[in-house]
Image (cartoon, helix red, strand yellow):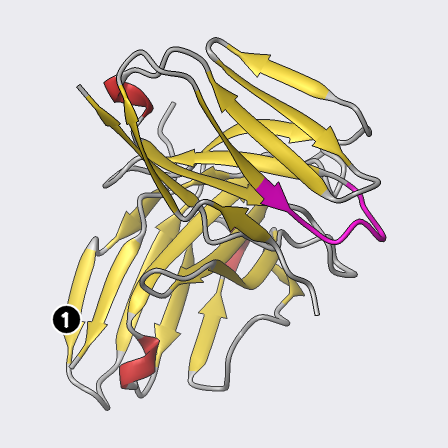
Amino acid sequence: EAGVTQFPSHSVIEKGQTVTLRCDPISGHDNLYWYRRVMGKEIKFLLHFVKESKQDESGMPNNRFLAERTGGTYSTLKVQPAELEDSGVYFCASSPPGQGPYRRELFFGEGSRLTVL
Amino acid sequence: ILNVEQSPQSLHVQEGDSTNFTCSFPSSNFYALHWYRWETAKSPEALFVMTLNGDEKKKGRISATLNTKEGYSYLYIKGSQPEDSATYLCAPPMDSNYQLIWGAGTKLIIKP
């Protein structure tokens, strides 16, 4: 069974440009999460989808970030325009339906490293 | 403020030695504690989900204990091997939507 895949693995862009990150969750996993880790710091929650609906977007830092999950399959996270402080590793994770909300085991992708110059 | 602290930040251990490290979290409104293992250039992987005070979980040479009253969990590794080198992350689900609040991790390096 394929795991969570993320693309690109690394992106280097200039301040003011746009980047779109993609996540393909494990098939059948209704829950999809986006997280970000700035170097040396904690992983921070960004957003949670259940199927195609945004269940919780309380972690999205500002309106330069837009996440979509059309059709409830893969998801994209767009940063437009990118700023220096957006640099970090963006992780996607998925979890199957049916687990209790606080017991969900997350299956992570390897992350997309974003460098904004 | 929801604060999850992990100590030490990094740890060098001789191969064959046993080691342990700590995760501290607010003890109020406790639901569960998750431990993840994250090897460099790979995906974080779930180790344990713990829910009950006094809980002890084990997976091979790795075990964890939980004290919900005082707000801490210990992760133990017995007879460390090079493949145990990784960052170990703990995360309790603590906000109103049960989203995981992550510690900064303990980076474990096993010296052969």
Horizontally, is A41 left or right of A113 in the view? Answer: right
Amino acid found under the numbered disc labelled 1: Val
Q: Nearer the viewer, residue A67 or A15?
A: A15
Number of on-image labels: 1
Magenta run includes residue B106: no
The residue tagged 1 is A12
Residues shaded magenta: B23-31
Image x and y of residue A117, in percent: 15, 82
Q: Secondary structure at mark 1?
A: strand
Horizontally, is B3 left or right of B83 in the view? Answer: right
Q: Nearer the viewer, residue B15 or A95?
A: B15
Give above or below for B23 relative to A11.
above
Residue at the image position 23 percent from the left and 41 percent from the top: B41
Secondary structure, magenta segment, majority class: loop
Image x and y of residue A42, in percent: 46, 59
Horizontally, is A100 left or right of A83 in the view? Answer: right
Image x and y of residue B58, in percent: 58, 13
